[in-house]
Amino acid sequence: MDNLVNETAYLNFIAQAILMYGCLALFICGIIGNSINILVFSYFPQFNKGSTPVFLLFSFAGSLTTFLTGLLPQLVAQFSGTDPLATYLILCKLRWFIGIGSATVALHCLGLAALNQYLLTSRDIGRHSWITRRRAVLMSLFVIIFFLGLISPNLVYYTHTKNSINMTQCVIINPTAAIYNTYNGLVIYSLLPIIILSTFSLLTWWNLRNKMVRRAEMERSLTRLVFAQITMVLLASTGYVIRRMYQLYSTNIPDDAFQVAQNNVFNSVFTLIGFIIHTFSFFTYFFSSDTFRQKILSLFFKRKRQIQPTTNPIRNTT
């Protein structure tokens, strides 16, 4: 019995450590990486031509917002011991509206980038100009409005309630709203992005494999960047789907303390996987593209390569 209690306590400790230090590492990498991505795709002409960079910029901005509204409150709760979501109702509602909404927008804007890369590799030259930069902005704004609308019930149904040990929690207590939120997240944040990204990635790969078009070097580099990020997102999204499916399966299964501790570890790991989707795009770009890497190095080491002013020593002639 004592061994079971000790194992339960140990598993709970592991779950908390994973959330604290794993989320902190992802937060730092995500904030820095997405900020650099926005800078590079806005500052360098090689990376801001055409409509694909527009979708990517919206995606980076969505990921950055996800860290600030979705992960930051969780870090504050883990390190301070005071959950801001349980203290302020407005933060509770906004975290599950803006935090989830921005993450969803980030994934679907990446899906639009994949769609655009498919059109750009099409044999039909007319398709190359279907999505202009102006249309890309309008499409991205539509994605924001549409998916925030689907997630807007979170503003109403997320509320404060007391649990069995009289602690305030930020949760959905309406059963119908809880079911909607679970299946809505599974579809729009997991299954739909996986289908869109997989489909257009395969179609683009097929176009390139069959040499339907000749691409400029910069366009090929951008295609590699998008492919690399899509691969990373698909792997992480698959893990997120597994977590969602398990949550649906285990909803009505009574758990003892040890099973709850095991579930906490499981959820902690897949919580990290969910945020990995928005974390490593910069590092994926950096290691998969020589052009991107060179631009980053030139951006941060530009001053060192500048010619330094020289001064001639004054000789004392007296």
Image (cartoon, rainbow, N blue to C red):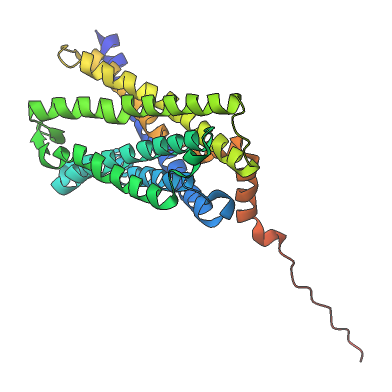
Numbered-mark total = 0
Residue occupying image coordinates x 14% and y 14%: 252
Q: Nearer the viewer, residue 100 or 90?
A: 100
Q: Whole-percent x and y of residue 317?
A: 92, 89
The vertical placement of 26 against 31, above or below, is above
Q: Which quadrant would residue 151 be assigned to in this image?
A: top left
The vertical placement of 230 against 36, above or below, is above
Residue occupying image coordinates x 65% and y 59%: 302
Q: Whole-percent x and y of residue 10?
A: 33, 20
Q: Quadrant of the N terminus?
A: top left
Q: Nearer the viewer, residue 250 or 14?
A: 250
Residue occupying image coordinates x 44% and y 39%: 113
In the figure, is residue 242 to the left or right of 90? right
Q: Nearer the viewer, residue 264 or 247?
A: 247
Q: Is residue 82 visible?
A: no
Q: Is residue 157 visible?
A: yes
Q: Which quadrant would residue 183 be assigned to in this image?
A: top left
Q: Whole-percent x and y of residue 95?
A: 23, 43
Residue at the extreme right of the image, as rendered: 317
Residue occupying image coordinates x 20% and y 41%: 149
In the figure, is residue 280 to the left or right of 181? right
In the figure, is residue 219 to the left or right of 33? right
Q: Which quadrant would residue 291 be assigned to in this image?
A: top right
The vertical placement of 45 against 161, above or below, is below
Q: Nearer the viewer, residue 227 or 306?
A: 227
